Image: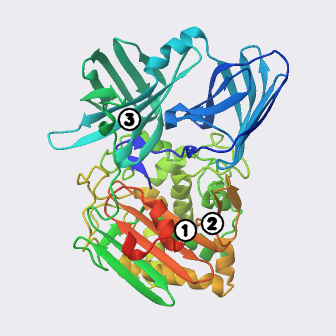
Amino acid sequence: MKTVTKIVSLLVLLFAVQSMLVTSSYASSNNTFDGMWRGELNISKGLKLAIGINISDSNKKLTINSPNQGMHDRNPSSFSIEGQSISFYDESLNATFKGQVIGDKLEGSFTQGKSMPLVLHKLSEDDLNRMAFEGKYIGDLQINATSKLPLVLHVAVIKDGYSASLDSPSQNGFGIPVNEISIDTHKLSFTSDMISAKFSSTASDQGYVGTFVQGMPLPLTLTKVNDNNAHLQFKPAEFGEKGGSVAVIENGKATMRFWGNHGPTTQYEIGSISKTFTTYLLAKQVLEGQIELLTTTDRFFENASAISMQALATHTSRLERNPPSLQKNADPQNPFAHITRKMLQEDLLAPNYLPEQNTHEYSNFAFAVLGEALAINRHTTLEKEMQKHIFKDLKMDNSYLSVKADSKQANNMAQGHNSSGQVVPRWGMGAASGAGAVVSNLDDMIKYAEYMMQLPTQQSELANLLFTSYTPTAGRFEQGLGWMLMKDDKGQTYAWHNGMTGGFSTFIGFYLDGSRAVIMLNNQASSFDQKAHQLLTREQSLQGI
C-alpha cells in the first residue's frame, strides 16, 4: 500500500529523463507550427497530467515536456511533421503520439500501454507571460510542535490557465489532483476535492504564506524551487536508516543481513505484498471448485457491478485506486481502519463501475473487494481464512492479518517511520485488509518465498493460476494473479511485488525456475525498488546495499 495522511496515492505515468538520438521528417512547405503546445492527459478518474511539445526552427526540432514531473525539452526517438500531421515516438518510454493540427489545436491520441485522447493547444503570448509561475513549490505542513509533513505543489502552464498536482513525498503520495488553482504575484490558492483540502496564501519574501485546511487549518509556506534554494527539495531515505532485514535465497540456503537492532523475528507491515496472499486464497478456492475466476462481485455484494474475480486480481477491474469511503471520516494516522464491508458495498453500487477489458490500473479498492468476497464465499472472515490456509499451513507462526492496529500478535513489531524519519503508528485496515494488512517477519517471509519458488518447478495447477500472464502493463511488466512478472537481461522470468504503508516499505521477488529469491523489509516508508530488483538480478550484492 502507498498512501498519505488522508491523501490518496495515485499511479501516474513515470517519465525517465534522458537524451536520445533523434530522427525526424518535416514538411518542405513554408507552414510552421513553431511554439509551445500544452494539454492535459486524462490518465484515470480525477487524475490529469500536463503534457506538451515545443516546436522550433521552422518545424525542424521537436521536444517533449511533462512539467508536473520535472521533464523539460526531452528529445524523442523520432518525430514527424508532415502537412497538418504531427507525431512522435519515444522508445525508452514506449510512448507514441499522433495528431492533426486544427487551428490552434493539435488533436490526437497518446499511447503508453493504452491509448488516451490528448488535445494540445498552442500557447498564446499571454500564456507564455505566465511561465514565470510554472515550477515546483515546496513547504512543510506543521502538524504539531514536533511533527511536520513536506508538501510539493507542481504548477504547469496550459492554455488560459494552469494544471497542478500535489505530492506528499514523506508518505509516498504523488500526483494528487488539484482541481482549481489561482496564482499571481500577490497570492496563491488551490483546492483538491480528492483529499477535501484547500490552501490560500499571500506572497511574501519567504514565498506564499498561508493556511492549508484539511479538516483543521494548519500553517504552510510554499516556496518556489530555483537554483539558489535547491537544497529545500525532499531527499528520500535510504534503506536501513531506521533498521531493516534482507534475505537472499539461493541453492536452498538463505543468507541474511540486518540493520539496526533488527533480527529474523522482527515484525513489519508488508503492505501490498499482502495482495499475493489474497490471490493465493483465490487460486486455492478456484482449485477446490468453490469459486471461478469469472465469478462476479454481484454474487457477494447486492446491486454491485458485475466485476470478475480475475479482473479484481489482475488490476483490470477499472475500480478506483482506493475505496471512495477512504475519504469519509478517515483517521489521518490510520486511513483504512474505518473501512467496513458495508462501505465497500456502497462503493460498488452499480452502475458506477463498468469494467473495460485489458485496461490495467492498479487498485487497492479491487483487492479490498476481492478479500471480502473470498471471505463471504467461505462464510468466514479474511483473517481466519489467511490464518488457516497460509500462516498455519506454512508454519508462519509470527504472521497475521492486521485488521485492527492494536493486535496482540504484534509481539516483536518494529517502530514504523515515514520517509522524513518521524515515528508513525501501526495500521489496521478493516475490510480493506485484503489489499495490504499482513504483518510478518524475515523468518516467515523466507518460508513464504521458498514455498512460492517451488510451485512453478512442480508445474502445478496452482502455479499456472498464479503465474500466468493475464495482461501486459505498458511494456514494463506483465500481470499475473496478484504477482508482477518481469524478465531480466538474460530473458529469465521472475515474479515480484512491493509494499508500503505509512511507516514500512517491503519487497519480495523470486525466479520462476526456483534459482534465487530476495526479501527486503524496512521500517520506513521509502521506496527502494531499483535496489531490490538489482539485488534479485545479481546486479547488486547483499553487502553492497
Q: Which mark is residue 125?
A: none
Front residue of 470 and 62: 62
Q: Residue at x 61, y 49 (%)?
A: 361
Badge 1 vs badge 3, beta-carbon distance below 8 Å: no
In this picture, is 25 found above or below 535? Answer: above
Which of the two marks, 2 or 1, is nearer to us in this view? 2
Q: Can residue 440 be seen in the rendering of this structure?
A: no
Circle 2 SS class: strand
Badge 2 vs badge 1, beta-carbon distance below 8 Å: yes
Q: Quadrant of residue 511?
A: bottom right
Front residue of 515 and 277: 515
Report how far apart the C-alphas of labels 1 and 3 lie in the structure: 30 Å
Q: Amino acid at mark 1?
A: Trp
Q: Can residue 178 be seen in the rendering of this structure?
A: yes
In this picture, is 324 found above or below 229? Answer: below
Q: Is residue 187 left or right of residue 156?
A: left
- Residue at image mark 3: 152
Circle 3 SS class: strand
Q: Position of residue 281 (x, y in %)?
A: 56, 72
Dot placed on the residue nearer the N-terminal end, 2 or 3: 3
For label 3, count other residues whose C-alpha is less than 10 Å away and answer few (under 14), some (14-19) or many (20+): many
Q: Position of residue 29 (x, y in %)?
A: 85, 18
Q: Quadrant of the C terminus?
A: bottom left
Circle 1 SS class: strand
Q: Which mark is residue 496?
A: 1
In this picture, is 279 found above or below 208? Answer: below
Q: Amino acid at mark 2?
A: Met
